Amino acid sequence: GIGMGMTAPVSITAFPAEDGSLQQKVKVSLRIPSQFQASPPCPSDESVKIEERQGMTIYSTQFGGYAKETDYVNYAAKLKSALGSEAAYRKDFYFCNGYDPPMKPYGRRNEVWFVKE
């Protein structure tokens, strides 16, 4: 029952299939604003969970525009190629992040994150 406003990034946990496409299950995460961090309001919808994301080291690539699933898949493939076989990172999921509201037409920022092992 408390309005918290939108935060950035909106982070989608993507689970890649064998062919690089994304499985149908995704997890969308929103950052709880600073003033609610110590004591977040309890969600009234049981499908909404509050979880703490631990610190992590990531490999990242950034791109612009209105990102679609195919953009995230393509940039994840480019990041995978750039890292080669030497970098150790989680292969079972990655993060797709958008930083801008839908009404921002220019200078949009999107990122793909691989979590370093």
Image (cartoon, helix red, strand yellow):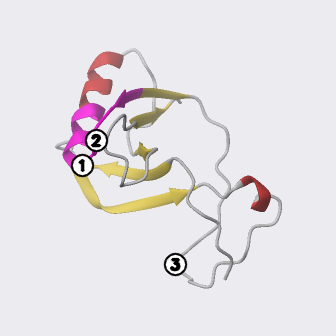
Q: Residues within 10 Å of mark 2 (few under 14, many from 20)?
A: many
- Measured from the top left, where is residue 63 in percent x and y? 33, 31
- Under mark 1, the amino acid is Lys
- Measured from the top left, where is residue 71 in percent x and y? 23, 40
Mark 1–mark 3 distance (CA, rounded to whole Å): 24 Å
Is the residue under label 2 in contact with that under label 3 (CB below 8 Å)?
no
Horizontally, is 104 left or right of 48 in the view?
Answer: left
Which one is in front, 7 or 14? 7
- Under mark 3, the amino acid is Ser
Q: Is residue 84 visible?
A: no
Depicted 81 relative to depicted 1: above or below: above
Residue 107 magenta: no
* Secondary structure of the residue carrying numbered label 2: helix
Q: Residue at x 26, y 21 (%)?
A: 81
Depicted 108 relative to depicted 51: above or below: above
Which one is in front, 104 or 51? 104
Write down the quadrant of residue 7 in the picture: bottom right
Q: Which residue is mark 3?
A: 47
Q: Quadrant of the N terminus?
A: bottom right
Q: Which residue is mark 1?
A: 68
Marks 3 and 2, the one that precedes in the sequence: 3
* Secondary structure of the residue carrying numbered label 1: loop
Q: Which residue is mark 2?
A: 72
Q: Residue at x 43, y 52 (%)?
A: 101
Q: Residues within 10 Å of mark 3 (few under 14, many from 20)?
A: few
Total label count? 3
Is the residue under label 1 in contact with that under label 2 (CB below 8 Å)?
yes
**Mark 1 or 3, closer to the camera:** 1
- Measured from the top left, where is residue 10 in percent x and y? 48, 52
- Under mark 2, the amino acid is Tyr
Q: What range of the chain is rendered magenta?
A: 61-76
Marks 1 and 3, the one that precedes in the sequence: 3
